[in-house]
Image (cartoon, rainbow, N blue to C red):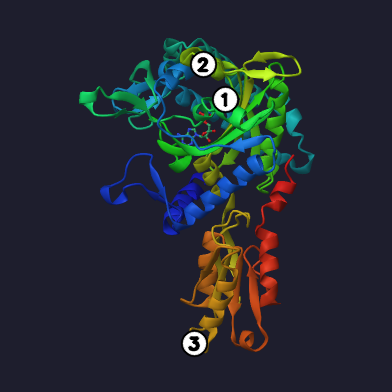
Amino acid sequence: MAEDVFKKLVAHCKEYGFVFQSSEIYDGLGAVYDYGQNGVELKNNIKKYWWDSMVMLNENIVGIDSAIFMHPTIWKASGHVDAFNDPLIDNKDSKKRYRADVLIEEQLAKIEEKINKEVEKAAKRFGDAFDEAQFRSTNARVLEHQEKWDALHNRFAKALNDGNLEELRQIIVDEEIVCPISGTRNWTEVRQFNLMFSTEMGSTSDGALKIYLRPETAQGIFVNYLNVQKTGRMKLPFGIAQIGKAFRNEIVARQFIFRMREFEQMEMQFFVKPGTELDWFEKWKTTRMSWHQSLGFGAENYRFHVHEKLAHYANAAVDVEYKFPFGFKEVEGIHSRTDFDLSQHQQYSGKKIQYFDTEKNESYVPFVVETSIGVDRMFLQVLSASYKEEEVSDASGQKDTRVVLSLPPQLAPVKMAVMPLVKKDGLPEKAREIIDDLKFDFNCMYDEKDSIGKRYRRMDAIGTPFCVTVDHQTLEDNTVTIRYRDTMEQDRVEISKLRAIIAEAVSMKSLFAKLK
Ligand code: GAP
């Protein structure tokens, strides 16, 4: 059912100019996507919400924009050349390749699903008297599934932490996991595969340099730590934020823009005094969760997921997960990265990368807490939460279904559509006058084609919060009909009031005010 909604959402993204398959006329390129006329607006608004919440609201956070190409030794220092690997396994019959950890995670999710089904069934049976906590801790079937889940989970976590590839394969064999394509259990060994794309800089006769397309934007921040700290006279704690493209040769590239090979990240590295990093980690967990929840998609749809296996650089790590139509999945990672990256760059570059603490009268390498979120994944999250099919009835009482994107108005690609009731009698000119007056404030759209009803539906489908209709009365008294996307209610208002009504709804101030 939820998967059905997801398919519709993907089709909707194409039909309404949000997301297109890259190189579509050449049959596409795997896991690479382009953003269309509405997609790019929504994406820019998401980036602005993030950027301003970091750089504008915090006087100790500044932004940078570093190059995608960087010195190759950076990736040696960061550990990505040696350790940025996925454990892969092939099915010998279908010749399909999978991430071994993902196959096991899916198995865990199946067991979780069984538990949830038992709970749902019981909740229906017992109605208001249902005590979920008690049921989960006493029901025999739930306990049996839970025991299985715990055992598998522990075995899996240990194999990951030990980097034990044979054990990962053994788990897949023991759990009788089959290839979704061939349906067989004819698996190869598990091997490591590096996710970085590489290319060459300079001509071969010069001796070309092998360089990598960055797999995260964070390293561009670390290698500019000294530049920013010195030129900005920054004092600890302070942060550097960046939005930019990242590239990963993902093997399991699935679920539309959830996992792409070229994507965009919004990352912030917060530099702190050693020993204070876990307090800052907790603080950023709270702040980032409130950033997500301020959008109003329901607190119950978010959760933290504590990492089973800490990355080579982290001493604490958590994901913010959202309940997508295909289950709870990571949108953002928050990591306490210790002094790993700066120390490594200090060692590999031979340059001192330290902070002089005037209070302590000593120099040290700062510790880092990172918040890292994918723009595209956030885009998918916002669309998944906003896409709705609603039963409505028209003026004559006829039932109809409308597809509406109930986007937060602050993120909507178009804020206001202006529609002349008819294409004559000076109404189009009046409509254009309104747009000319407001187009410096908001993204406005003019639409005169088809019936007003059809025009409203088109605007609902791209999430436009306000539709303004210009009719003959407008020419007499300078009033228009304003129609609200979510309630579909209409009001008659003076044209001179439009700016204030729309500004109030689309200003990011109301989102920022909710942040912790
Ligand atoms: N600097 C830390 C870092 O890159 P990560 O957990 O690998 O951490 C952070 O990535 C975020 O980037 C993820 O939470 C996700 O939103 C996004 N992301 C990672 N890989 C992605 C991919 N292949 N496609 C789309 N988004 C991705």
CA distance for labels 1 and 2: 10 Å
Residue 120: horizontal and vertical position, in percent? 65, 38
Helix, strand, or loop for circle 3?
loop
Q: Can you identify the residue that label 2 sits on?
A: 351
Instruction: Name the spot of residue 111 as percent of width and height, x first.
Output: 56, 27
Q: Is residue 165 above or below residue 133?
A: above
Residue named by callout 3: 424
- Indicate the secondary structure of the residue bearing disc 2: loop
Amino acid type, residue under disc 2 in the picture: Lys
Quick one: quadrant of the C terminus?
top right
Mark 3 or mark 2: whose residue is earlier in sequence: 2
Q: CA distance from mark 1 to mark 3?
A: 63 Å
Q: Nearer the viewer, mark 3 or mark 2?
A: 2
Mark 1: amino acid: Leu
- Please, which residue is most extreme toward the right here? 129
**Which residue sits at x=54%, y=58%?**
413
- Residue identifier under label 1: 226
Q: Nearer the viewer, mark 1 or mark 3?
A: 1
Name the residue: 76% across, 37% down: 130
- Residue type at numbered disc 3: Lys
